[in-house]
Amino acid sequence: MTTGVARAAEPGGPSPDRSLTSLARVLDQLGTTLLNLVVGEGRLSSSVGGVGIHDPHDDSPLPPASLVLGVGVHEPHEVAALLLQLGKADAVGLVVRTPLVIDETIRTASDVSGVALLALARGASWTQVAALLRSVLAETEVGGGRADSVIEMPAGDLFTLANAVSALVDAPITIEDLDSRLIAFSSGQDDLDPLRFETILGRRCPARFRTMLEDRGVFTAIYRSAEPIRVEMPDVLPRIAVAIRAGDEVLGSMWAVTQALTDQRRTAFTEAAGLVALHMLRQRAGADVHRRLRTDLVATVLGGGASAGEAARQLDLAAGPAVVLALCTLPADPPVPAARAEADLQRSSDAFALHLATVHPGSACGLVRGVVYGILPVPADTDDGEERAVRIAHAFLQRTGERIAFGIGIGRTVRTVADLAQSRLDADRALRVVRSGRAAGPVVRISDVYAAALLLELSDLVALDIGLPDGPIRRLIEYDAEHHSHLALSLRAWLDAFGDVNAAATAVHVHPSTFRYRLRRLTEVGGLNLDDGDQRFTAMLQLRLLDI
């Protein structure tokens, strides 16, 4: 078999003297739910330099110390051959998907090559594991091989860094992201103007000032310049602002309240922006790793199966009864850009996780395929778990306001972790009813909309069958289309009125005598026996599916 490895799209390989993440730390970060070491315990202390993807048709060289994803490699002889080839490329490990049969050939190949073999859990996507691995490695990458500090402070402590920059330039400092949200600020902000005061209290630049800055092209000037920019606005003190960049990516801006900076302080201010970028990247990488890991664990718990219990343990999910809540954003008018919608949903996921954690520390939350799932433990001595979930969901919507419209579906209360897959299915079905517009409000329990959920699922089956089968309802619809009559509509009104002719006639705005004639006619045309309960039920079901 001809094999090769296409290296992942990442610029350059790691330099030999860079401090890298060990294989043991990678496994510790991702947990046994996602990756398991199968063979090659002796490589745990080896450093991982990058992520590669196996491609039998590409012989591009690997960066040193790669962890290679063996996409499509299953048979023992294929695994053994690839291990031997990767050993020549100085790879650290090979990841293959379970189930995996380990025989003596594989063990020997791992010993000879010095390449560890890891098993990827069933259900996890290769894209997902590649992103997670790169995020784990990024924690060291953004640190540039330094110790766990930058200018003698804990990595990621932006408030300490803001104070250090303030001392360097002798001016109060704020650090803001691209949306003018306040990330950190220095001390010495007491006697400044109202803008700085409002920014710190509100944790972001006030909207009126941000609009003024945008209209004047200030942000554009800051982000285009490699040097600090002087900013003047009415009724506020002058500022000096500099862009915070990581390569070509602009992460935000840093602001100093001062009339001017000396050349020396100007240089220090500019160089400090690079250190701030390192801290912001490190924070982002760490947050991404944590978020993705929790998402994978939540997805594993909700998927059920043998791994659910271990995933629940890693999440510190409280044992006992629980209920699943499913949240998503509803369509906006006008529609928002896809990137903003995705960012809004991620922020909403973080906010929902915080909201649930304040209610019950043993809860868990994760964004899985466009839906935010919350797992809420329920006291064992109560039977109102779903009602409690409804109250918690409404409280979250009240706190988030009306800027983003949410829908929340709530599943049934289940007794064990193994049953959470059923509660998740219920929550998904309830959420679909909300998104279809057939719910009474934005928060619904599956028990309240069970019939509507079933109708939506039956409508999917009807769509797969390409319409209604031959029968009474189809004959009535075709007759109405040909003769411009209203027999199907009259039948629906009669069924909705439980056979009350007067009420049904009123609903379709005809005289009761006319309606009785229509009933006789629809039984003749459709071949319906309205005295038969099964035929009435079938007719009602098909007519409701036509509505959907």
Image: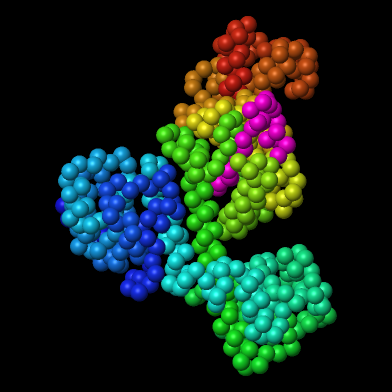
Percent of width and height locating residue 388: 70, 33
> Which quadrant of the rendered structure holds the C terminus?
top right
Residue that sits furthest to the bottom in the current view: 263
Q: Is residue 151 above or below residue 530?
A: below
Question: What residue is rendered at 72% in x and 79% in y?
Answer: 172
Counting labels gives 0
Is residue 240 among what the camera can see? no
> In which quadrant of the rendered view does residue 390 lie?
top right
Was residue 72 drawn as part of the magenta stretch in this picture? no
Q: Is residue 198 above or below residue 74?
A: below
The colouring scheme, among rainbow, by chain, secondary structure or one colour, is rainbow
Question: What residue is rendered at 69% in x and 51% in y?
Answer: 404
Was residue 369 drawn as part of the magenta stretch in this picture? yes
Question: What residue is rendered at 59% in x and 17% in y?
Answer: 539
Percent of width and height locating residue 270: 59, 84
* 193 or 345, nearer to the observer: 193
Percent of width and height locating residue 105: 17, 46
Question: Over which residues does the magenta segment extend?
Answer: 364-392
* 142 or 22, nearer to the observer: 22
Q: Name the side, left or right, on which 464 lies relative to 84.
A: right
> In which quadrant of the rendered view does residue 269 lie?
bottom right
Is residue 444 among what the camera can see? yes
Q: Name the side, left or right, on which 461 lies relative to 447.
A: left
Percent of width and height locating residue 68: 31, 57
Q: Is residue 456 above or below residue 373?
A: above
Q: Name the side, left or right, on which 462 lies relative to 509.
A: left
* 449 or 2, nearer to the observer: 2
